[in-house]
Image (tube, helix red, strand yellow):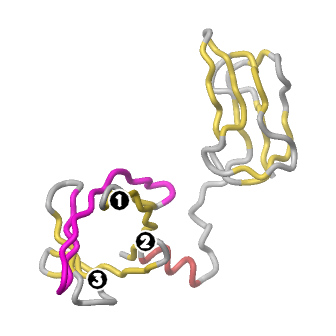
């Protein structure tokens, strides 16, 4: 397993039930609890806590010294796919966003041609007197918008298409 914390790549291997940094055998990782880890070197021991794991984006958020750090996790399969030029082969391609429920479009926050990121708010839909932020399930470019502000839509109505 490889972990990339702020562009400092560390390759971890499990030796005698302990995680050891393969690139530096003088660094070891000792689990303390389900979400706490000690990182030990010759000179120091630091404690980090895992505060979140995003399996979709293969990242982990670590807390150290009251600061949050994001680490990217790469597995052997990721490295193999990258070496073959297929690093996005396992990424699910989504071409459209559908209304999750019947409602009224309160606001459209993107335009055709806009580049959006995963999780970016793209539309606001009112349903049962509640505002629901519709977020982009994929990174990409907006190809078309099939609704306008004030339009009523049924469940599964295609709201936005991506290129």
Disc marking residue 62: 1
Q: CA distance from mark 2 to mark 3?
A: 13 Å
State if disc 2 and disc 1 touch (CB < 8 Å). Answer: yes
Q: Nearer the viewer, residue 5 or 80?
A: 5
Span shown in magenta: 36-57
Residue 98 spot, x, y in % from top left:
70, 32
Q: CA distance from mark 1 to mark 2?
A: 9 Å
Name the secondary structure under disc 3. strand
Q: Quadrant of residue 59?
A: bottom left
Query: Mark 2 or mark 1, which is nearer the start of the sequence?
Result: 2
- In front of the other: label 1 or label 3? 1
Q: Rate crowding at label 1 as few (under 14), some (14 to 19) or many (20 or more) other CA atoms within 10 Å.
A: many
Residue 137 spot, x, y in % from top left:
63, 44
Disc marking residue 21: 3
Name the secondary structure under disc 1. strand
Q: Residue at x 43, y 71 (%)?
A: 5
């Amino acid at each position: 397993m490889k972990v990339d914390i702020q562009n400092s790549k560390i390759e971890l291997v499990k030796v005698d039930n302990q995680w050891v940094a393969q690139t530096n055998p003088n660094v070891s990782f000792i689990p303390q609890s389900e979400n706490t880890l000690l990182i030990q070197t010759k000179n120091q021991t630091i404690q980090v806590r895992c505060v979140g794991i995003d399996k979709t984006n293969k990242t982990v958020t670590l807390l150290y010294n009251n600061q949050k750090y994001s680490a990217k996790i790469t597995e052997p399969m990721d490295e193999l796919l990258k070496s073959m030029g297929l690093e996005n082969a396992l990424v699910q391609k989504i071409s459209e966003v559908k209304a999750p429920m019947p409602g009224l479009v309160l606001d459209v926050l993107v335009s055709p041609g806009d580049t959006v990121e995963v999780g970016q708010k793209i539309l606001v839909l009112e349903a049962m007197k509640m505002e629901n932020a519709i977020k982009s399930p994929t990174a990409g470019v907006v190809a078309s918008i099939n609704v306008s502000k004030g339009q009523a839509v049924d469940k599964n109505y295609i709201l936005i298409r991506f290129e």
